[in-house]
Amino acid sequence: MAVAVTVWRTGDLRRALGPVAAGALVPLAVLLLAACSSGAASVCDRSEPPAPSRVEGTPLAVEIPRAGASASPPGKGPKVVLPEDADEVMRDLVHRTAAQRTSGEVRPGTCEPDGSIGAQTVERCTVTGGGLDTTWRVYSTPLGDGLSRYDAVVVSGTLTADAVYEAARQRADKGPARCDRLPETVRVEDAGKPTKYRCQWPSSSCASDAGGWRFRWVNSYVTLSGGGGVEFVGGDDGASDE
């Protein structure tokens, strides 16, 4: 059996191959396209994974309503209580603390010296309200002419279960989310350090050999951020509930 070998060069392909070979080019192209289409059909569309119908791993106890779903009515919001003699720094700390609350009163506490770092003076200031005290560390840097600049980070505080669930919902966008069943309030003595409580969201991966997308729960631990809000840190693959 004779085997024809074609060397591709510039010029008129139909004239170079002749009428029989040129006619054979069409079924060859069809075969090549069919082979490519067959392979592409088994690969996930990476641009937009579908909503998961099944998620591997151990689901946590509380299902978080998705964004747009009906949830419990929002609270009335916090009430800021500021005496007239409250200084600018304390006023700012009270408002920043209130921004992380859903209800109750928020009022100034006290500030105590907490050492110095070079030219900076350091104070620990507490904002109180409803037993949900928040402690801030305030760094003040003199700028001259009686002016100073300050920075403040949260040292310790209290998170509410509602705030954690809402943060989990926002992180999920329109996807599913679950959390441990939290007590009404969670005290965090070291902001940024993980608590024992977790929330989880599905992580997707393309498994072309299995015929499509696969989803698995991924856990993160709840903590208090330096700004006084909810933060999720660390985590695991959700394989167990240990």
Image: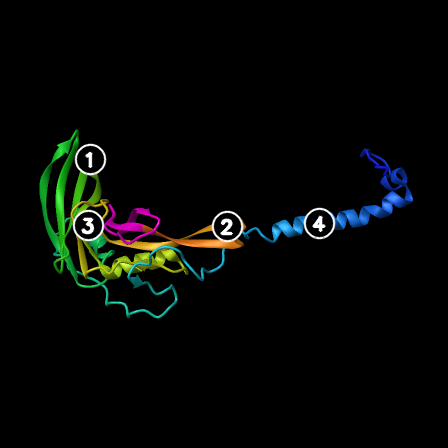
The residue that mark 1 highlights is: 141
Q: Residues within 10 Å of mark 4 (few under 14, many from 20)?
A: few
- Give, as a three-letter code, the residue at label 4: Leu
- Residues at discs 2 and 1 in contact (Cβ within 8 Å): no
In this picture, which residue range is highlighted in magenta?
220-242
Q: Nearer the viewer, residue 134 or 112?
A: 134
Q: Nearer the viewer, mark 2 or mark 1?
A: 2
Instruction: Tell me which numbered mark, 2 or 3, is placed earlier along the sequence.
Output: 3
Above/below status of 101 relative to 25: below
Q: Nearer the viewer, mark 2 or mark 3?
A: 2
Q: CA distance from mark 4 to mark 1?
A: 69 Å
- Residue 230: within the magenta? yes
Q: Is residue 197 visible?
A: yes
Q: Residues within 10 Å of mark 3 (few under 14, many from 20)?
A: many
**SS label for mark 1:** strand
Q: Nearer the viewer, mark 4 or mark 1?
A: 4
**SS label for mark 3:** helix
Res 207 label: 2
Q: Residue at x 14, y 37 (%)?
A: 122
Q: Is residue 144 visible?
A: no
Q: Residue most toward the front? A: 1
Q: Nearer the viewer, residue 133 or 91?
A: 133
Q: CA distance from mark 1 to mark 3?
A: 17 Å
Residue 118 in the image: state x and y as whole percent.
17, 29
The residue that mark 4 highlights is: 33
